[in-house]
Amino acid sequence: MNQCDGCTACCTALEVRDIILIKPAGKTCPFVCKTGCSIYDNRPLGCHGYDCVYILEEDTPLELRPDKTGVLFEKATTRIYLALIQEERLNDWDTELIRNYIKKLNDGGISVVLCSYKHGLMDVFVTSEHDPDKVVEITMGLANKWSHLSTAQT
């Protein structure tokens, strides 16, 4: 299983609204240190709820480490992933490596919703088992729910 090993892409890319921290997307978290998160065991709910595919899925190639690719794959459900493109990588994320990984996910029955904070929904790669509108609805609904949960504490 992969480890963060110094990858802090989520610490910059993600928006966090929590009692511990209010941080906009694209701004580096003040709790980032050389080894990662200095408050990892007590991190905000918004961070704790982030399900990084690179860490969670045993077969994720090392080359897909989010800080190397500029794309953070998050598990929205067991069959739908959200692919968040880091704003500074909007012009160079579309590589053969990323396209092949999305195809592999689709071939395995996993749909992928590609988006960025600045541009919103950018593309949807849907398996034949899923309705594209439903995939987007589920993914965006979960994103809104997570924001609501992390804001509810403030």
Image (cartoon, rainbow, N blue to C red):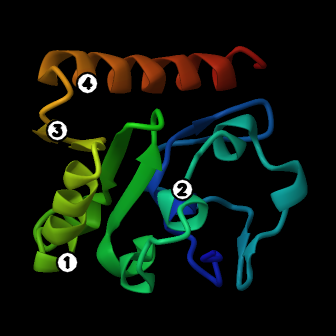
> Disc 1 versus disc 2: distance between alpha carbons?
18 Å
List x then y, in percent, for residue 3: 65, 76
Nearest to the eye among marks 1 and 3: give it.
Answer: 3
Q: For this rendering, which residue is in front, 90 or 97?
A: 97
Q: Amino acid at mark 1?
A: Leu
Q: For this rendering, which residue is in front, 65 or 12?
A: 65
Which residue appears at 58% of the width and 16% of the height?
148
Which residue appears at 33% of the width and 50% of the height?
84
The quadrant of the picture occupied by the C terminus is top right
The quadrant of the picture occupied by the N terminus is bottom right
Residue 65 shows up from this direction: yes
Mark 1 vs 4: CB contact within 8 A:
no
Which residue appears at 12% of the width and 33% of the height?
128
In terms of sequence position, does the residue under pointer 1 or pointer 2 come before the other? Answer: 2
Tell me the residue that label 1 is attached to: 97
| SS of the residue under disc 2 | loop
Which residue appears at 65% of the width and 39% of the height?
49
Residue 25 shows up from this direction: no
> Disc 1 versus disc 4: distance between alpha carbons?
23 Å
Tell me the residue that label 2 is attached to: 52
> Disc 1 versus disc 3: distance between alpha carbons?
19 Å
Tell me the residue that label 3 is attached to: 127
In terms of sequence position, does the residue under pointer 2 or pointer 3 come before the other? Answer: 2
List x then y, in percent, for residue 104: 23, 62
Q: For this rendering, which residue is in front, 102 or 88?
A: 102
In terms of sequence position, does the residue under pointer 1 or pointer 3 come before the other? Answer: 1
As drawn, 97 above or below 70 = below
In terms of sequence position, does the residue under pointer 1 or pointer 4 come before the other? Answer: 1
Tell me the residue that label 4 is attached to: 135
